[in-house]
Image: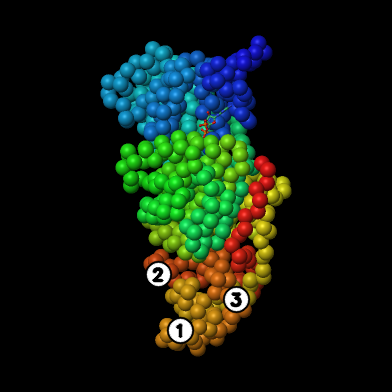
Amino acid sequence: MLSQTDSPEVQVLKTVFGYDAFRGPQADIVRHVAAGADALVLMPTGGGKSLCYQVPALLRGATAIVVSPLIALMKDQVDALRQLGVRAAYLNSSLGAYEAREVEEALRHGELQLLYVAPERLMTPRFLDLLDRSEVSLFAIDEAHCVSQWGHDFRPEYLQLAVLAERYPHVPRLALTATADEATRREIVEKLHLQGARQFISSFDRPNIHYRIVEKNNALRQLLEFIRAEHDGDAGIVYCLSRKSVEESAAWLAAQGVSALPYHAGLGPEVRARHQERFLREEGLVMVATVAFGMGIDKPNVRFVAHLDLPKSLEGYYQETGRAGRDGLPSTVLMTYGLADVVSVRRMLASSTAPEPVRRVEGQKLDALLAFAESAQCRRQVLLRYFGEELSAPCGNCDTCQNPCETWDALVAAQKLLSAAVRTGNRFGAGHLIDILLGKDSPRVRALGHHQLSVYGLGSELSERQWRSVVRQLVALGYLTTDAGGHGSLIVTPAARALLKGECALRLRRDSDKPVKSARRPAA
Ligand code: ADP
Ligand code: ZN
């Protein structure tokens, strides 16, 4: 209901968009930008970034230019705005010459309130020339982290957007992103010349999401038990690394009576569109997908997200898990994770042909993810700290808070394992090294003469499973690495020297031998 005392921003929000109130920092951002100042908005996906430029666009008159790399989403956004009676249009490579000309004419005649443009189109001399002759009230630069050369979404055209600051010094600029690490933020400010811009940084905490990571033994079975026990009949997303595992997992779940659909880039566009449509419209479907699925998907009641394979970074994990519980109701995210995952992502990194600085950053991102997976601390604290946010107390709504995990002094065990690797020339995988430590009398051990090593049989205090947990954590912590050749050989790294000399302490997580029983969900 409109009231006499409503500010102009709230009036637009109510009358045009049909919402009652701004959410979180939206009101401050809208006021700031509508007044003509620059801003950098950092808000998690689903937080409501669009209104931050749409409302000021309508308040400021003339035309707001929205730069977005997501060509596939432009049409939907523009259609939605038109439905609300907003004069919006888009320009990208999907338009024919005639349609494009019409949009350009509309811009020049001041008939548009919002124009969405792909960055490569914006930066053409022809379009800049057109802008010079048009009245522009605002530049909104969406997905601003695409300027980051070290990020996985880097777009060279985004670097050229720096031109806007020089060419249109009096037009306010608003950069928006959901990628929030400190380094990326600094890069956006620098590359887009936003030194004077006010920064609006929202909390990345999603309190209604319960975080859980379990040791992988049979990922699909574990997933099925999880769904049956906690999310029977709920909508969910299951992420797998490969198209093949997407297909197989979806088929297996369906055979077990779960309504599951596959989604990956190898399926035809019609199949993808149909599956996505069904997921959005029907209740209780489980989408088994590669990371190709999810961008721009706005389904509020996704009750769980599961990762059967390790994501590439903590940012990726956060984005993908963030698709759960947009409606604010309790939701669970589950990741199954094991030694083979660590080995295969480390191998992928090692064999990458990317330039050295990119590889180094990718390595750091992976390390952060592994540290998160192996942490004995509150998951939420670790996750938020990565995004530069400090949560003062453990959250009480993650697996480590609810089932505090024990740690143990693993220095001697680690020394035994590292020695076994060193003594055998860093040429063997986890299975063989563990066989040696457990004193297994296998033909392979004999043939290689490894029963004569001093470490042979020296590790019987731990079970094979416990040794695997030690190996996994040593790889995750960077004391062991795997060969680039893909044979799974474990190689002791220079970092392990201090451990071998006993110059530092090592505490590892004790993986519970029982399956993790889920604690009751707390009220959100
Ligand atoms: P983002 O771009 O940050 O991922 P969107 O701008 O797409 O988020 O908004 C996510 C969802 O939240 C959309 O469905 C949008 O309509 C809704 N939304 C945003 N702001 C509000 C608000 N103030 N009141 C109600 N719904 C809102
Ligand atoms: Zn916690």
Residue for badge 1: 442
Amino acid at pointer 3: Leu
Q: Dot 2, how many residues are within 10 Å of its Cα: few (below 14), some (14-19), or many (20+)?
A: few
Secondary element at tag 1: loop
Query: At 61% from the left edge and 71% from the top edge, which residue is drawn?
Result: 498
The circle drawn on residue 123 is: none
Residue 462 bears which disc, if any?
3
Q: Nearer the viewer, residue 70 or 523?
A: 523
* Rendered position, 166 above or below 182: above
Dot 2: what SS? Answer: loop
Q: Is residue 368 visible?
A: no
Task: Count residues near mark 1 (Cα–Cα under 10 Å), then give few for <14, some for 14-19, many for 20+.
Answer: few
Residue 43 drawn at (x, y percent): 57, 36
Residue 345 visible in the displayed image? yes
Q: Nearer the viewer, residue 129 or 19?
A: 19
Outermost residue, front direction? 257
* Sequence order check, earlier mark of 1 and 2: 1
For the residues labelled 3 and 1, the Cα–Cα distance comes to 19 Å
Asked whether mark 2 lies closer than 8 Å to ligand 2, one says no
Q: CA distance from mark 1 to mark 2?
A: 20 Å
Amino acid under disc 2? His
Does the closest atom of ligand 2 sit within 8 Å of the Cβ of label 3?
no
